[in-house]
Image (cartoon, rainbow, N blue to C red):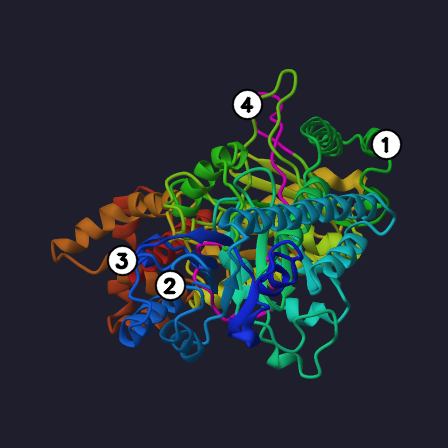
Amino acid sequence: MPPTLASLVRHPGLKLSVLAGEDRLETPVRWAHVSELADPVPYMDGGELLLITAMQLKAEDPDEMSRYVRRLVGAGVVGLGFALGVKYDEVPPALAEAAKEEGLPLLGVPRRTPFIAISKAVSAAIAADQYRAVTAGFEAQRELTRAAIGAEGPAALLARLASHVDGWAALYDASGSVVAAAPDWAARRAARLVTDVERLRSRPGPASIVVGGGGGAGATGAEPADDTAVADRVELQSLGTGRRTRGVLAVGTGAPLGTAERYAVHSAVALLTLTTERSRALREAEQRLGAAVLRMLLAGEPDHARAVAGRLYGGLLDAPFRMLVAEVPSGGAAHQARMASSAADEAPAPAQAPAERPADATTAGTGTSVSTGTGVGTGAGTGMGIGRSTGSGTGAVPGTGPGTVPGTGATMAAGAGAAVGEPEPADPLATLADTMEAAAARTGESVLVVPDGERLIVLAPDGGSAVEACAEHARAVESRRGTKARPRGRGAAAPHGDELVIGLSAPAGPIAAAAAYRQAEQALSVARRRGRMLVEHEQVAAGSVLPLLADDAVRAFADGMLRALYEHDATGRGDLVASLRAWLSRHGQWDAAAADLGVHRHTLRYRMRRVEEILGRSLDDPDVRMELWLALKATASCTST
């Protein structure tokens, strides 16, 4: 406890007497200050015990004393010490009455007690309180460390932290899901901080925000009777060593954190960061190992891949899995954000001293906040990396190896070029990886995540939570997009946030990994051309083939094939294009096609001979008829869009 006016009054060596404000003696004292100025307010910070002799004051003037005391109270002065026996043997009634009216504690200081003795007593009490806080902080650090390395891990750490701050604590993973909370009821409170956690994740680390206000029911360790009425103060702290947030710690209390409590929170942040950030050497080793496993699978060496993977990937290779290929086409806004974030993710975080109160404006908050894989390049310039998720949840960062090229980073937010405090552009590939890894971590699945240049390759158990999380993520994005499928070419730049496309293979085993990869690529191509975010291989043959013709090369071929006919029609010498379309749509039936056109069948025969003469190709050839029909469809699609 910091020193209070009551503790100074009880100090046996000071012999202070209480002359006014007896009901406010428990007010903490930040410092003791001597001033004989008629207006010392400009030099006050608030929380001081002001010591005076009244040498320069009109202490017997009621109006002057009323104004003097009122200014002191307005400046946050917590008490007034008056020296007895210096200028006045007793406190002037005007000053005593003004102190009583304003509720300012007034202490009488006997002549034998020098002001410096009071200053020393306050300073010693403050130092002792700080020492107790530091000692308590070190003890909390030891307890939290023992909890962190124990069998229960973060759950035990959060329980100890909640006890130290007399409140609650919760841990969010990289995707924003609550993975642990203490006490148990705190999970409901933490689940209402989704928006605030997302706001924190959009900022480069380290970062923190404060949500909520003063204390209320449920701010301490007891479960609130009405969880919806909680008015606690929640501090959100980002976890991670780089600019990218790897998780979020939430601490809820009934009042701002004290020194000892803040020491405990800082220790918890450091320990939780260590549990979410593995050593760089270990991560790089896992990256190289995972990339090698994928290469072996694609090379048709499943036995070698299984032997190299060992227990690292659990039962991923012992059961059917799905191969996922996702990409962000070049030129899109998300592609540019991803390139910028690749460098920003590994850049050291700017030094930031922990603030007692983050600069964010306090807001009322509700509900929950990634683990990514980035990494090792292989072979002839193909950047590849590896990320792994298990029951505890992990993420990978960039690395390199012998004969490799650097892989691209997969991060949640692009730090480069963004102003501090502004939301940063999201990386769709990293968001997808985070979503799948977090889902897998919550259920104990193993997933293999390999960033490959502008692509992301994922192996996930068939029917598992990671695949389902991918599907839900795609549905959510398309729902936010609010538009129907829009065909586009591979190089077409879509609006920001609209670039990511995903292809998902059918279930396969390690021996069929190469076939699964081809299926995923085929599904990816269909998704790109249909304007869909996610297409499974089973859906490739569904629907019409015509959306697949929405490609610049196909359109160029169609334009070139039909150009001579369009030029002929432009001269007004006949409608060959419409006649050809009608004849093909009627499968070469002269009477039906002529009726559609409103001409005689001999006229139609003449026009079809002219088509053959102009194109130099025979309409008796089924391949020619097929190509002409598809060319007509492709040009019609181009005209309609």
Compare marks 3 and 1 and give the one earlier in the sequence: 1
- The residue type indicated by label 3 comes to Val
Q: CA distance from mark 4 to mark 1?
A: 26 Å
Where residue 620 appears, as percent x and y from the top left, is: 42, 51
Mark closer to the observer (4, 1):
4
The answer to whether the residue labelled 4 contacts the one labelled 2, judged by CB atoms less than 8 Å apart, is no
Q: Name the residue carrying label 2.
A: 75
What is the secondary structure assignment of the residue under circle 3? helix
Q: Name the residue carrying label 4.
A: 381
Q: Name the residue carrying label 3.
A: 577
Question: In the image, is residue 42 above or below residue 288?
Answer: below
Magenta range: 358-385
Mark closer to the observer (3, 1):
1
What is the secondary structure assignment of the residue under circle 2? loop
Q: CA distance from mark 4 to mark 3?
A: 48 Å
Q: Is residue 410 left or right of residue 139?
A: left
Q: Is residue 505 visible?
A: no
